[in-house]
Image: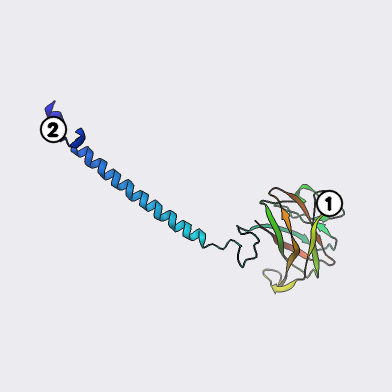
Amino acid sequence: MADVCKPFRSGRGGLPEEVRQLQAETIANLNRLVRCLNDTAADLQEQISGIDTGGGGGGGSGGGTLVAIPFGFDLSSSTTDCWVPFGPHLIETASTNAPRAYHVFISPIAGTIATIRATSESDPGTTQLQWYDPDGSTTVGVAGTGTPGAVPGTGGASTLYQTEYTFGTPVSVTAGQRLLLEYGLSTTAGEVAGVIEVTP
């Protein structure tokens, strides 16, 4: 039995010296790991603190990360006010018709909507956007109006028209709130693509 235990020399506490040495090395490695994690956490916190979350000059009302919801549709031959489609759908319908499920905007967060930006293929003239309850008859807030400005085009259109719609009083929304958005125009806008900015 003495020959079996010979490779291990007893140290303090009754543990073989080799085991105590391994234990000390493990503790030292763990301490280095903890220091490394603390340094990484401090670096991340510094980076997060430096991010502009919209509470300063970006126009945000309460700080936080702005969420942009895209939309798009084709008004190549229509001059009728319409319900804007959302999600992967591109089919608008006249606002005199009953809206379909894909015409319902669902707010992803609680916050306010103060700005909607849209780019159109043709000059739509002065247009307005109006929010409605899902019943399609009760307005929510005041309409946002905008006048387009010409911008360099891409692809088949040499010129596009960019419109920024601002709401005098931002529309307050809750997470999951359902609304309809009416696009009012008096002339053909062509293909339209835009984003709705929701600021927490």
Q: Which residue is mark 2?
A: 6
Which mark is on residue 147?
none
Q: Position of residue 103 (x, y in %)?
A: 77, 51
Q: Position of residue 193 (x, y in %)?
A: 71, 62
Q: Secondary structure at mark 1?
A: loop
Asked which quadrant contains residue 12, the reply is top left
Looking at marks 1 and 2 on the same chain, the residue that comes earlier in the sequence is marked by 2
- Label 2 neighbourhood size at 10 Å, few (<14), some (14-19), many (20+)? few
Would you say 5 lies left or right of 121 here? left
Q: Amino acid at mark 2?
A: Lys
Compare residues 115 and 160 and report the one nearer the observer. 115
Q: Which residue is mark 1?
A: 136
- Residue drawn at (75%, 62%) of the image: 169
Would you say 61 lies left or right of 92 here? left
Q: Amino acid at mark 1?
A: Gly
Compare residues 122 and 2 and report the one nearer the observer. 2
Residue 130 visible in image:
no
- Label 1 neighbourhood size at 10 Å, few (<14), some (14-19), many (20+)? some
